[in-house]
Image: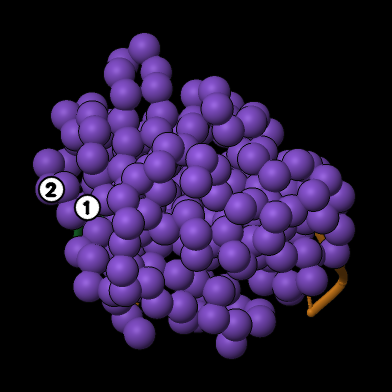
Chain colours: A purple, B green, C orange
Amino acid sequence: MDMPDLSDAIAAARQLIGWKLVTSSPEGITAGIIVETEAYVMSDPASHAFGGPKQRNLPMFKDAGTIYVYFTYGMHYCVNIVTGSSGDGQAVLIRALQPTEGMELMMARRNINNPLQLASGPAKLTQALGITIADNDQQLGGHIRIEPGIQVDGIVATTRVGISKNVEKDWRFFVENNPYISKRSRIL
DNA sequence: CGTAAGATGAAG
DNA sequence: TTCATCTTACGG
């Protein structure tokens, strides 16, 4: 397949596992295999889209393939791929990558040298790939793109991380036994 | 208009 | 376990 099915956040969150997330910049190319995602839909009290369009979540209500970057905890950026049709606020949060290309650049951006910690968390991977609020509301295919990656087995679905509402939904997906998933994911 | 909480990460 | 650090949304 050439593109994953982005018509539904939950299906897309599962399908995106194994795809490669790539960014290009003047400094070079950085990329990694997506090994952990979470789905958020409009009817979901844990979603930024809950309650309808607001200033911050506007990109979530655009067409599938839009990039939604948000700033949180005063210092971190996280990146989502918007799914569904225009007007339907849903997205897939990218939570962890297994680094594949541009390791040197990622290590320089993160100021660490352990590959296991380069992109094993939603805010780590944005830093490693150089994703900022400037990428918010852009389209996949520019600075940020996805490419077919690898076939992965052992995708498991369980509860999401860092939320306080609608916590029982199994809308987090990750590769079982993959060492590059986020730390909080390992606490099942 | 003041303020609390937040889809986190790293250090102590 | 705590703190860093700030935007958004809401009056909790």
Determine whether the residue tagged by mark 2 lies in a helix, strand or loop.
loop
- The residue pinned by badge 1 equals A117
Does residue A156 sit above or below A93 in this rendering? below
Amino acid, disc 2: Asn
Determine whether the residue tagged by mark 1 lies in a helix, strand or loop.
helix
Q: Are marks 2 and 1 on the same chain?
A: yes
Outermost residue to the left: A113
Return the x and y of residue A74 as percentages of the image width and height.
Answer: 52, 48
Residue A114 is tagged as: 2
Res. A2 visible in picture: yes
Return the x and y of residue A92 as percentages of the image width and height.
Answer: 58, 56
Distance in Å between CA atoms under marks 2 and 1? 6 Å
Amino acid, disc 1: Gln
Q: Residues within 10 Å of mark 2 (few under 14, many from 20)?
A: few
In terms of image quadrants, where is residue A169?
bottom right
Does residue A9 sit above or below A1 in this rendering? below
Return the x and y of residue A5 as percentages of the image width and height.
Answer: 61, 53
Looking at the picture, tell me which residue is in the foreground, A69 or A181. A181
